[in-house]
Amino acid sequence: MNPTILQPILNPIKYQRIDPAQVARYVSKHYLDYSYHETIDEFEEPARYTQPWMISDVIRQQLQATINPVQIFVVDCKGRTVYSNAFTQKQRNVLDPSLYIYEHTMPLALFDEGIYFIKVVAGTINYISEPIEIKNVWENSLLLEYSHYRFYGDVIFETGFTSALRVLGSLKHFQPASKDTTYEDQSLNQTLLHSVPYRVWPLVIGSAIGIPDYLMDKINLILGCSNLQIDGRYYTKAEGSRMEPTGVEFYPMRGYRIDMREKYNRMSVLDSGEATMTGVVMIAAASDTKGFGTTNDAADAVLTDAV
């Protein structure tokens, strides 16, 4: 029986077969089957893209396969293997007993600055990644860290799996907004009964050079995760917002913009004297004393005053 491998698009790395089969009657090259540079048409402007990563980042991946082992290699631009390991086999997929869950964690502190390719080998199947470029610091970049409360995007998050993706972009210059409740009497005098202010943040991805379609596809899925941190702060998509492309004709990459909101709509700045506290403020009251703390659990994201 031929081996089966299921690679979720939600993984931060995109792979394609080293020697993809091309049907003679099909001329087009789909972005999921071929590397980005192979999908650029002759009439489009050539544009090189390497996926940005910093030495402080960690690449976490999950896949499902019917074959064991699933090996991973990292090669440099000269074809030299600088890292080799294997995916860790987790439990069997209860919905499809022929598939096992595999996960791998790779800290990029193991590598020097430079451009690399990641290979995944499972039996006779060989995959190669898009090029990744590791630097000490990528200016004007954002780290998207994500997980979901349940199965989503063919990723089984119930194993405790979390991942991250670095992109070039910005998240600043918010638009102030509010949700208001007003009362208007018979003379049309209006009274504001209740107002909850919040901030709408424009997330711009791709900067001036843009990103390939395969990366846009990943980001669109990532923005659907219930737990999304952008540089350590929790955000969610603003209701009704979607990724709006920006680009020029005959250029194969595009930038994108989408409105985001803070997951926890705070009205004060919380400083613990140490690291940034990313949870909501939770107040707990005992019989004689009061204490303050935070929680990152979405189920506890409600201000509590218990006596």
Image (cartoon, rainbow, N blue to C red):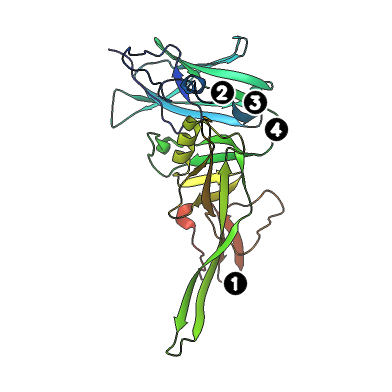
On residue 46, which mark appears?
Answer: 2
Identity of the amino acid at label 1?
Asp
Q: Earlier in the sequence, mark 3 or mark 1?
A: 3
- Judge from the rendering whether residue 142 lies leftward or rightward of residue 299; answer left or right: right
Vertical arrangement, residue 196 with respect to residue 250, above or below? below
**For the N terminus, which image quadrant?**
top left
Coordinates of residue 38 in the picture (x, y in percent): 48, 19
Question: What residue does disc 3 label?
Answer: 134
Q: Earlier in the sequence, mark 3 or mark 2?
A: 2
Mark 3 secondary-structure assignment: strand
Vertical arrangement, residue 143 with respect to residue 85, above or below? below
Q: CA distance from mark 3 to mark 2?
A: 22 Å
Mark 2 secondary-structure assignment: loop
Q: CA distance from mark 1 to mark 4?
A: 50 Å
Identity of the amino acid at label 3?
Ile
- Judge from the rendering whether residue 196 lies leftward or rightward of residue 34; answer left or right: right
Coordinates of residue 292 in the picture (x, y in percent): 61, 62
Q: Residues within 10 Å of mark 4 (few under 14, many from 20)?
A: few
Question: What residue does disc 1 label?
Answer: 288
The reply to whether callout 3 and callout 1 are in contact (CB within 8 Å) is no
Q: Earlier in the sequence, mark 1 or mark 4?
A: 4
Q: Nearer the viewer, mark 1 or mark 4?
A: 4
Vertical arrangement, residue 23 with respect to residue 130, above or below? above
Q: CA distance from mark 1 to mark 2?
A: 69 Å
Question: What residue does disc 4 label?
Answer: 137
Mark 1 secondary-structure assignment: loop
Q: Nearer the viewer, mark 1 or mark 2?
A: 2
Identity of the amino acid at label 2?
Pro
Identity of the amino acid at label 4?
Val
